[in-house]
Image (spheres, rainbow, N blue to C red):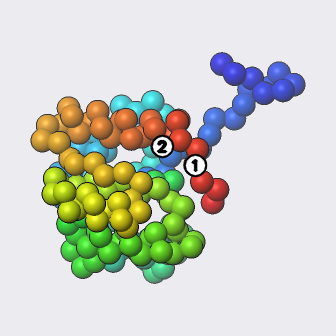
């Protein structure tokens, strides 16, 4: 264990706050299950459409007390406001653009990959077919954004 100066243990960093924008309950359940096996606690917040995602991120009703996420996992195929539009609005907003956004979708289309990066996605991940592969990807993303990458200042 590492110790801070003066012989005290360094405080553990707060858990990773993840906003999962997903309308498929099965995918939400699998991601929750995968995160239970993560190295450190991760708080998973879920909204099921793009309009709710934007309201959450902007702390608009009914999300006035929402915690700013450290990471957004964003599906592209969403009701109300699509994932591409959510991504564009987040990355164009000076108050939100530093939040890493990982597009996490079933799409394998090259145009979706290119368009997501054109809209400044931090990564594009295609959801695999098996739970084991999905769990491994989710744990890898969680580890990377929680332990490897530096979190942007709030």
Residue 74 visible: no
The disc label shown at residue 145, or none = 2
Between residues 30 and 118, which one lies in front from this camera angle?
A: 118
How many other residues sit within 10 Å of disc 2, few (<14), some (14-19) or many (≥20)? some
Residue 143 spot, x, y in % from top left:
44, 35
Q: Against 25, is 115 above or below?
A: below
Q: CA distance from mark 2 to mark 1?
A: 7 Å
Residue 153 spot, x, y in % from top left:
64, 56
Task: Please report the residue visible at 57 percent of the width from the left and 72 percent of the height from the top.
Answer: 95
The disc label shown at residue 151, or none = 1
Q: Against 122, is 11 above or below?
A: above
Q: Against 123, is 147 above or below?
A: above
**Is 71 on the left or on the right of 127, as rendered?**
right
Q: Quadrant of the C terminus?
A: bottom right
Secondary structure beneath disc 2? helix
Task: Please report the residue visible at 42 percent of the width from the left and 40 percent of the height from the top.
Answer: 142
Task: Please report the residue visible at 37 percent of the width from the left and 67 percent of the height from the top.
Answer: 119
Residue 100 visible: yes
Sequence-first tag of 2 and 1 = 2
Residue 145 spot, x, y in % from top left:
48, 43
**Is 67 on the left or on the right of 89, as rendered?**
right
User: Is the C-beta separation of discs 2 and 1 under 8 Å?
Assistant: yes
Between residues 84 and 75, which one lies in front from this camera angle?
A: 84
The disc label shown at residue 49, or none = none
Residue 110: image quadrant is bottom left
């Amino acid at each position: 264990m590492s110790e801070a100066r003066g012989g005290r243990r360094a405080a553990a960093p707060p858990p990773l706050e993840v906003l999962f924008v997903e309308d498929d309950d099965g995918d939400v359940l699998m991601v929750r299950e995968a995160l239970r096996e993560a190295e450190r606690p991760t708080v998973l917040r879920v909204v099921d459409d793009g309009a709710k995602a934007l309201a959450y991120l902007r702390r608009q009703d009914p999300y006035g007390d929402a915690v700013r996420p450290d990471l957004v996992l964003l599906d592209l195929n969403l009701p109300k406001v699509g994932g591409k539009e959510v991504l564009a609005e987040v990355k164009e907003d000076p108050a939100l653009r530093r939040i890493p956004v990982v597009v996490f979708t079933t799409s394998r289309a090259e145009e979706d990959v290119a368009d997501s990066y054109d809209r400044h996605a931090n990564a594009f991940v295609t959801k695999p077919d098996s739970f084991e592969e999905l769990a491994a990807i989710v744990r890898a993303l969680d580890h990377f954004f929680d332990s490897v990458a530096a979190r942007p200042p709030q």
